[in-house]
Image (cartoon, rainbow, N blue to C red):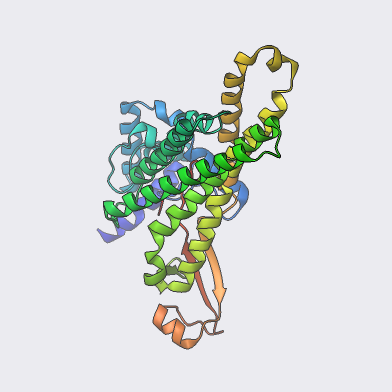
Amino acid sequence: MADTATTAPVAAASAASASSDAPPFQLGKPRFQQTSFYGRFRHFLDIIDPRTLFVTERRLREAVQLLEDYKHGTLRPGVTNEQLWSAQKIKQAILHPDTNEKIFMPFRMSGYIPFGTPIVVGLLLPNQTLASTIFWQWLNQSHNACVNYANRNATKPSPVSKFIQGYLGAVISAVSIAVGLNVLVQKANKFTPATRLLIQRFVPFPAVASANICNVVLMRYGELEEGIDVLDSDGNLVGSSKIAARHALLETALTRVVLPMPILVLPPIIMSVLEKTALLQARPRLLLPVQSLVCLAAFGLALPLAISLFPQMSEEKEKPSRRQRNSQGHRENPDGVASWKLRRGGAVCRVGECSED
């Protein structure tokens, strides 16, 4: 009986090897290598693919059943690797990996670009009032909080109060910085009206970036005291490390500053050029549709590129003292070097936000 259970995945893999175009299927693993930028880029393109929003209930059931058949070694003949990868993509896009419940469509990773683009357009609207600035910053952080909560790690549930704390901190920091910068720009007498308008368009970026840092600190400050899981080169848990936690927190904060940059910086630059064209000067009503298209393009193209810059797993090599290794659970290597991989969180990022691992 044990031999049958052991050989079942092997038989399923052999049945799936008919497709030469797709790599061999691995259940629960990314289709593309995560060690290269290109592999991460292709991986995140799959994750944010909005076509999965239109998958029918019947197609979802078929995908789940196909993966179950593969898992138990009962895959029907003729199933290809491409079909298995497609089934896994559909399941991961719609169902929560821990609860197996459907994620509300606006809060899915695949729904972030179509549902998040209107918020980006609102953030970058010119000549905003105090009320509109507060509204769009609040809506952006609220959407981020909902996406984070819907895609949270349910195997290690965090108290709801922790999410609320991070949400309130992000909203307060984003709104206060956006409003403060707008007031400073409006009171700057040295700027011409055109220059003042151009500067105001870049205000959302520092506001969102600072909110992201605040959210990271409030949500993960406990890791600095408790440490985070440390893995060896084979993926085995060898303990926890405060040093790795400090590295992870700094890298995650840096990531969340870089990620919103192409989405909130490129559109204002592009629009400042397009607005000078004869077409838009003659037809000012086209400004909003054109800006919406520019934001959609920046969201759809620049976001996966920015996400792919940083691997989800970081690897460090240090030479801590024997006391540190013993207290933090590091495995002692023969050469005296402790190596570990650390989780930084941020599987998928939205307007400056990343869902936590």
In screen coordinates, is 188 left or right of 62? Answer: right
Name the residue located 27 percent from the left edge and 46 percent from the top edge: 99
Check the picture and name the quadrant holding the N terminus.
bottom left
Q: Front-most of 171 and 113?
A: 171
Q: Front-most of 100 and 103?
A: 103
Image position, residue 307 (x, y; %): 55, 47
Residue 78 shows in the view: no
In screen coordinates, is 12 left or right of 272? Answer: left
Image position, residue 89 (x, y; %): 43, 39
Q: Residue furthest top?
A: 282
Image position, residue 220 (x, y; %): 40, 60
Q: Front-most of 308 and 11?
A: 308
Query: In which quarter of the view is residue 284 placed?
Result: top right
Check the picture and name the quadrant holding the C terminus.
bottom left
Name the residue located 61 percent from the left edge and 35 percent from the top edge: 201
What is the number of callouts on the image?
0
Name the residue located 60 percent from the left edge and 14 percent from the top edge: 285
Q: Residue furthest left?
A: 1
Query: In which quarter of the view is residue 335 placed?
Result: bottom right
Image position, residue 107 (x, y; %): 38, 37
Q: Is residue 277 above or below residue 1?
A: above
